[in-house]
Image: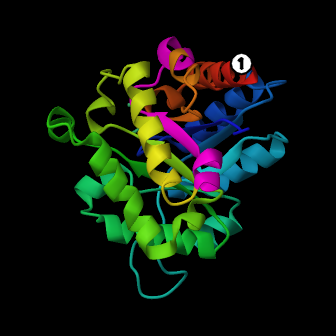
Amino acid sequence: MRHPVVMGNWKLNGSKEMVVDLLTGLNAELEGVTGVDVAVAPPALFIDLAERTLTDAGSAIILGAQNTDINNQGAFTGDTSPAMLKEFGATHIIIGHSERREYHKESDEFVAKKFAFLKENGLTPVLCIGETEAQNEAGETESVCARQIDAVINLLGAEALNGAIIAYEPIWAIGTGKAATADDAQRIHASIRAHIAEKNADVAKNIVIQYGGSVKPENAAAYFAQPDIDGALVGGAALDAKSFAAIAKAAAVAKAQ
Ligand code: 13P
């Protein structure tokens, strides 16, 4: 059985006060909730404070990050390494987010290198994939997702996906309020799993595939009712403790059935 994972991607949002308030609030909201792993990815600068806040609260919330470099140290101005993330307790690291692919011109191959380096450092990659609106309208969704995953498989083999997380995030659904329907998301998740199964059936069966893109408390349960949707990567709604906790609770309830 796959264990659901609901992760909050805070993107470029936050302040010291917000980190403490949001994490303290979220931890309280999640008291007694089991059956779902809940993770947060604050901006890198706030990971230290987030770690201290979660430790002080004795929280089970998993700490993550939004990006990594492919080196652990050296002359790489502006970057953050897996070793640093690890030292501050961040384990679940988002890579290949469409905003990085678009604004920072990150290629499939570069994202695959990040995947490899995270694994080498014992961290959990959260590999984002997904199509643009134009690709969606052209019927290219499955092939785009397959290509993005194949960059990792070609570099490392399908077994490298073991223990990693895939987040299917249709770009046109991110921050737009225009979420994919649960049925459409399920169809794509099933195709992603089938694509991996062509290489390794066990890995495909066990890998957590999250849906991301305008997930809200109101639509979360419908996604989690789908057999191949194992959690969510949440942007906007993760900035509110009650909303994010409601999404996590919906996953715990749906997947307990
Ligand atoms: P929204 O939930 O704000 O649409 O963002 C999704 C996302 O990009 C998470 O990584």
Image x and y of residue 190, in percent: 47, 36
Image x and y of residue 152, in percent: 44, 66
Under mark 1, the amino acid is: Val
Query: Outermost residue toward the bottom?
Result: 74
Q: In this view, does 105 lie above or below 8?
A: below
Q: In this view, does 97 lie above or below 67?
A: above
Where's the C terminus, which quadrant?
top right
Left or right: 104, with 83 as reference point: left
At 57% across and 60% down in the image, what residue appears? Answer: 161
Quadrant containing ligand 1: top left
Image x and y of residue 241, in percent: 61, 25
- Near mark 1 (Cα within 10 A), the count class, few <14, some 14-19 or many ≥20, is some
Query: Outermost residue toward the top?
Result: 218
Occupied quadrant, residue 88: bottom right
Inspect the magenta stretch and tell me whether residue 205 lies in it. Answer: yes
| Location of mark 1 (residue) | 253
Task: Count how many numbered circles sit on residues in the image.
Answer: 1
Image x and y of residue 17, in percent: 59, 38
Q: What stretch is highlighted in magenta?
A: 201-221
